[in-house]
Image (spheres, grey):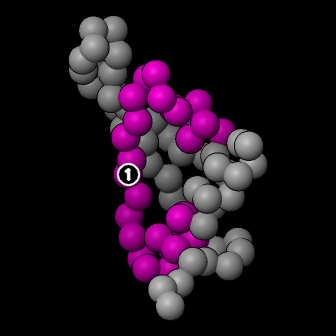
Amino acid sequence: MAAGWEEILRQAEDEAHARGCRTVLYTITFQAPGFYHKQGWKRLGEVPCDPPGTSRIFMSKELAAPTGNSVRPR
């Protein structure tokens, strides 16, 4: 199902690019930092948080021109 999540992220990135958004996200060490890294996101920093031993990871990505159909409001 990873390809499904990659497509959802790509569509969100395309829409953000079309709207001129800057991109920063955060995830937690036990969530999906590896997934975002594989999609081209770069780590900006890390801040310890609860539960002990975990951290918030802040990431950013320079968005390219859309690669497919963006989601548009109806």
In-image side of 17 versus 11 (left or right): left
**Residue 28 counted in the magenta span:** yes
- Decide if residue 22 is on the left or right side of residue 35: left
Give the residue displayed 53% in from the left and 84% down from the top: 72
Q: Is residue 19 magenta?
A: yes
Residue 11, by quadrant, is bottom right
Where residue 62 appears, as percent x and y from the top left, is 51, 58
Q: Is residue 28 above or below residue 67?
A: above
In this view, the residue farthest toward the top is: 53
Element marked by disc 1: strand
Position of residue 44 relative to residue 39, above or below, is: above
Give percent across and percent down for residue 14: 57, 71
Q: Is residue 44 visible?
A: no
Does 55 sit left or right of 38 as displayed?
left
Residue in view at x 35 percent, y 16 percent: 54
- Residue 44 % position (x, y): 38, 37
- Viewport quadrant of the N terminus: top right
Residue found at x 75% / y 48% = 3
**Residue stretch in magenta:** 12-38
Residue 48 visible in the current orientation: yes
67 relative to 55, above or below = below
Identify the amino acid type marked 1. Val
**Total number of numbered discs in the rendering:** 1
In x, y percent, where is residue 55? Answer: 33, 21
Q: Is residue 41 above or below residue 66?
A: above
Disc 1 marks which residue?
Answer: 24
